[in-house]
Image (tube, helix red, strand yellow):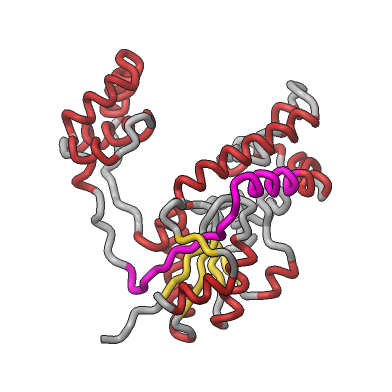
């Protein structure tokens, strides 16, 4: 049986060295990189989203870097729809392609597809909101355990938003939330999941130094130029959202920078959890050995 092509998926927390690892892999396997970073799609954002440098972009062909306006937002599902034909073309020339980014949902959409759920009815949404307000987290937990015990066992039971989302689907459809999971068709390629191995204390130091460099490179000026678009979801993210209160006179520049560093570290912590199943590799050589052994 002919072996499927291989997508090497490089994930991991911000500032961990994903870009350098992806470029090293792309150069070794003579292939191209699909960026799955949900903020690097947009031309207007460069500093605050740590877009690869011109030198890095020249080192290996990249897709989905600054290829559209933030006024044309790209969802995880639409990203996969656009990326799959690109991968199909790449796999005609090489058995290996690279995907890189810290946006786990976008990577999952590309590699596995996203499950489809029914459109939530206003009545279902109102019912869940009333339950949340009247009985809190414990009420959400008890209701989901009653309606979908299978999903209740696997979900983060302390995450109220996830419980609410599942209940809205249950109320809308009259079926368990879990009955909609795992229905996406399989991809015509295999995946190997890697992340740079990095000590957490060193990572946090890298994050702090990266923020200082972003500020030195003109992050505040970039943000000011984007002020009229501050309502967009992509600008309500770490590195941008912290500047809006400063521009409103709520605190000073030093506080904004402090918050960016703090929120970046917190975001990295969440990413570490998301990418916990990705294989850590010490360097490009180890990554190449892992891919060649896949």
Instruction: Give the answer, above or below, for where 176 lies relative to 60.
Output: above
Residue 204 lies in the magenta stretch: yes
- Residue 141 or residue 278, whichever sits in front: 278
Residue, x 74% and y 67% (percent of image)? 54
Q: Is the C terminus in the top left, top right, bottom left or bottom right quadrant?
A: bottom left
Q: Which quarter of the figure has residue 65?
A: bottom right
Residue 189: where, in percent of width, then height?
36, 73
Quadrant position of residue 264: top right
The residue at 46%/72% (across/down) is 290
Q: Is residue 3 left or right of residue 63?
A: left
Q: Is residue 54 left or right of residue 139?
A: right
User: What segment is highlighted magenta in the picture?
Assistant: 187-211
Quarter holding the N terminus? bottom left
Q: Residue at x 59, y 67 (%)?
A: 283
Q: Position of residue 140 (x, y in %)?
A: 28, 24
Q: Position of residue 153 (x, y in %)?
A: 24, 38
Q: Position of residue 241 (x, y in %)?
A: 65, 35
Query: Is 145 positioned to the left or the right of 75 in the image?
Result: left
Res. 85 image quadrant = bottom left
Q: Is residue 120 above or below residue 184?
A: above
């Amino acid at each position: 049986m002919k072996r499927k092509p291989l997508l090497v998926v490089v994930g991991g927390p911000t500032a961990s060295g994903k870009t350098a690892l992806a470029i090293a892999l792309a150069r070794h396997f003579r292939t191209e990189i699909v960026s799955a970073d949900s903020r690097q799609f947009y031309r207007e954002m460069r500093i605050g989203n740590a877009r690869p440098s011109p030198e890095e972009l020249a080192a290996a062909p990249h897709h989905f870097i600054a290829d559209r306006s933030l006024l044309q937002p790209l969802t995880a599902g639409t990203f996969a729809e656009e990326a799959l034909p690109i991968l199909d073309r790449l796999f005609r020339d090489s058995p290996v392609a690279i995907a890189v980014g810290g946006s786990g949902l976008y990577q999952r959409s590309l590699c596995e597809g996203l499950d489809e759920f029914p459109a939530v009815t206003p009545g279902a949404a109102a019912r869940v909101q009333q339950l949340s307000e009247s009985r809190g987290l414990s009420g959400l937990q008890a209701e989901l355990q009653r309606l979908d015990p299978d999903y209740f066992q696997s979900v983060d039971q302390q995450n109220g938003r996830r419980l609410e989302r599942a209940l809205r689907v249950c109320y809308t459809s009259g079926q368990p939330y879990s009955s909609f999971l795992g229905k996406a068709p399989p991809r015509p390629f295999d995946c190997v999941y890697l992340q740079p191995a990095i000590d957490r204390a060193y990572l946090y130091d890298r994050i702090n130094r990266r923020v200082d460099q972003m500020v030195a490179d003109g992050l505040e000026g970039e943000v000011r130029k984007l002020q009229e678009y501050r309502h967009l979801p992509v600008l309500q993210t770490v590195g941008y959202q912290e500047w809006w209160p400063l521009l409103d006179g709520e605190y000073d520049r030093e506080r904004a920078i402090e918050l960016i560093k703090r929120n970046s570290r917190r975001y990295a912590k969440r990413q570490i959890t998301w990418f916990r199943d990705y294989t850590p590799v010490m360097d490009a050589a180890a990554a190449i050995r892992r891919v060649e052994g896949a």
